[in-house]
Amino acid sequence: MKNPFVVNCRNFSESNMLRPFLGNIGHGFVVLSFVFSLIATYFFFLDSKKENNFFTWAKRAFWIQSIATVGICVSLFLIIFNHYFEYHYAWDNASLSLPLGYAISCFWQDQEGSFLLWMFWNAIVGVFLLFTFSKGKKKAFADNLHSPTMVVISAIQAFLASMILGVVFFSELKIGSSPFLLLRQSMPDLQLWATNPDFIPKDGNGLNPLLQNYWMVIHPPTLFLGFSLTMVPFAMAIASLWKKDYKSWLKLALPWSLVAAVVLGTGIIMGGVWAYETLNFGGYWNWDPVENAVYVPWIILVAAFHTLFLAQKSSTALKYSYILIIAQFILILYSTFLTRSGILGNASVHSFTDLGLSGQLLIYLLTFVVLAIVLIAIRWKDLPRDQKELDTHTPDFWVFMGVLTLSLAAFQVILTTSIPVYNAIAEGLGFDLNWAMPTDPIAHFTSFQMWLFIVAIALTGLGQYFWWRRITSKKLNELIAPLIITLLVSSIAIILTKINDWKYIILLTASIFGLVCNLSILTDLFKGKFKVAGGVIAHVGVGLMLLGIMFSSAYERTISINMTGNQIFSDSEKESRENVLLWLNRPLKMGDFTLDYRGEFVDVRGVPGYIEKKYVKPIIGSGFKGLALAPITDNNDTLVNRFDTLAYEAENTYYQVAYSDSKGNEFNLYPRFQVNESMGNVASPDIKQFWNRDIYSHVTYVTREQDKEWSAPMDYNVALRDTFFLNDYVAILDDVVGVNEIDGMELKEGDAAAVAILRLLERDGEKIMKPTFVIKEGQVWSKPVVSNELGVKAQLSRIDPVSGLFTFSISRSEREYIVLKVIEKPLINLLWLGIILLIIGITVSAVRRFQIAFK
């Protein structure tokens, strides 16, 4: 954590009138939200007993807590956006250099903000749900379930509000962690407060470099909206068990489940795209424990809405629906516990540190676990039973097989992901378990998940045929046509793509079978039943996703093969083999491409593309402002004049790598590298997308100017046109010319300046260096120039007018280079297309089911 001592301070009296009170206002809203969540819970509970009509009072209480929740959000946003760094949350997460988009991400970077984001969406979802219970909408959901449903939702909101309550009882019992603490409240032991109680840091820590991506502006809100939506079918299921009304909840729970699956799935996918574009492990999914913890409830939710489709007519499906709907929300709470309790420790790059709320989180989780288990255990014997067993020739059977497969996939993931929990439980019981997470999580999870999804995609084809074609034991021959087409298409694909691994041949064949069956059904539905085609579209998307995952992962190709035999990384032979060293302006041929590292660039705000770093001079102490050393133009428009002050992303450096192939195709990629002392250095890739592949590039090592070690300068006395030798280079002094200005400063009478034209001959041609010598206001100084390409620093240190000799001080260092990894990911667009179709398909189904519910 950054020490507030090292930054300058401003006087507290500069604050506007509201500024000193924002924390108290925000905390007041927290208390109001918590109290009225409890009041709403109590009134909805009273109304559920139907002894008195408390629904109106309960609804008003819920509205008040919702307005209070919005008030909390507004208060925290004002603190962050106005850079009120006397508040710990703003100082710890925001900084003056962050643009607006990333400043928004500061809101949910820490735990308190993420809980608040969840509360905000819960309030919105709860208010919308109350609207659906209003007059004219009641027939979509039984009247006797309104208040019980809202009891659960209000209780959830009360638990979340308690997480940011930030109060301490009896000096030991802490309830929640407030986002509105002042620095002097969060760090009271600092000696600074005794001498300067009004101290305010001039700048903050800033945003985690991993979160400085546009996906992080939209991914967390989408994910937490998904979290909030999952509570609706859960609350409806609990309400129906409570009131022994086992059918009325299904009509509205189904579309809410579909919407929750769409939004939560979209949030997860956004996280995958963020990882693909920002993290340097070379993919979109790394089986990180936090990723898994969110993926598992989504898989269970997908399984749940499949059983909900059948639950109206099948008691078995009804029982499975209760189990799965309850499980998906409990798993959301479990994922929250895993992520925020600190139990994962170093097992995940996404986990939060423990704020001392692990006990509170555990109570939150166990409350709903115990409530759900006890309630369903009590009501289980009352649930209706089917009179006959499932027939393998019915659609229901194949749906259940698919549900079972998805459930097994989820179970396998959560079983491994929970290893740190097993260790913690064992430690609490007094013995060491010391189980370790898989050393290669990708191989571990893929070895199970691939086979389960092979079964799942095959079942989507069979299930659709049994559902729409009404296949019976006497009509099994209808499956012959899709099987023949599958074998034919698979054979062609295997030949064209040169797949030779038997596991991937099976995966390819199963995926194509699912696609053939679903596309066949989709062709029929397009003739007039498109509104019911949502499931088929989603299944087509799943088939394409599996193909995209297989090709882009199993058949990715490393382009950057190191053919020199040099060990770039002493601790990894594999990484040394798969990374290449690119010298500045030294093209290197690799496979189909020739790569040329062209130098360092920065991102200037308001300017398209990237600008060479040498043309932006940092303004010391500003953090994110610089001086333009040359005009910046876009076509014929001058965007920034020379010596104008500009804003730029000072902490990020982009490394331009020019690609060209034998066909004359050319493009530039700009992988990013950020040096961040407080949070660690971060390398982010850049990607060139083609219709059939991605070229994925990221730097694994860079040379930095401040890390260079220069040799002691050596002096060379030369005359005009003289030649002298600098180790590998031949240097020629072509000329020394007088100039009237230096770095934009005009010379006055009595001043003088000269620029030497120094030509260096090397392997690939020649380079020009222009050191300067200045006499200004009686002071003599010289400005060295640096050629990072040659690793040479030249300074014209003396001019002898008598002898006509010029003295150059020359220092040598390592030439500038980067280490680059380049991967080709074939047919990855099948994955993105499949994801889009999956989202569209579930959305179509959700819209249709809402229409049915409100007819």
Image: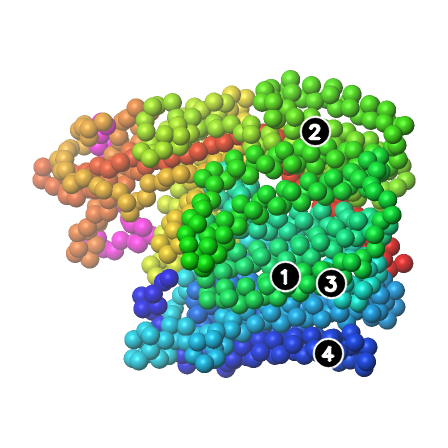
Question: Rounded to the nearest whole Å, what is the CA distance between mark 2 and mark 4?
Answer: 53 Å
**Would you say residue 732 sits in the magenta stretch?**
yes
Residue occupying image coordinates x 42% and y 26%: 561
Three-letter residue code for mark 2: Ala
Residue occupying image coordinates x 83% and y 55%: 384
Magenta-highlighted residues: 729-751
Three-letter residue code for mark 1: Val
In the rendered image, is residue 108 in sight?
Answer: yes
| Mark 3 / mark 2, whichever is N-terminal | 3
Tell me which colouring the rendered structure shows: rainbow
**Looking at the image, residue 169 lies above or below residue 529:** below
The C terminus sits in image quarter: bottom right
Which residue position holds label 4? Answer: 43
Which residue position holds label 3? Answer: 378
Which residue position holds label 2? Answer: 510
Which residue position holds label 1? Answer: 369
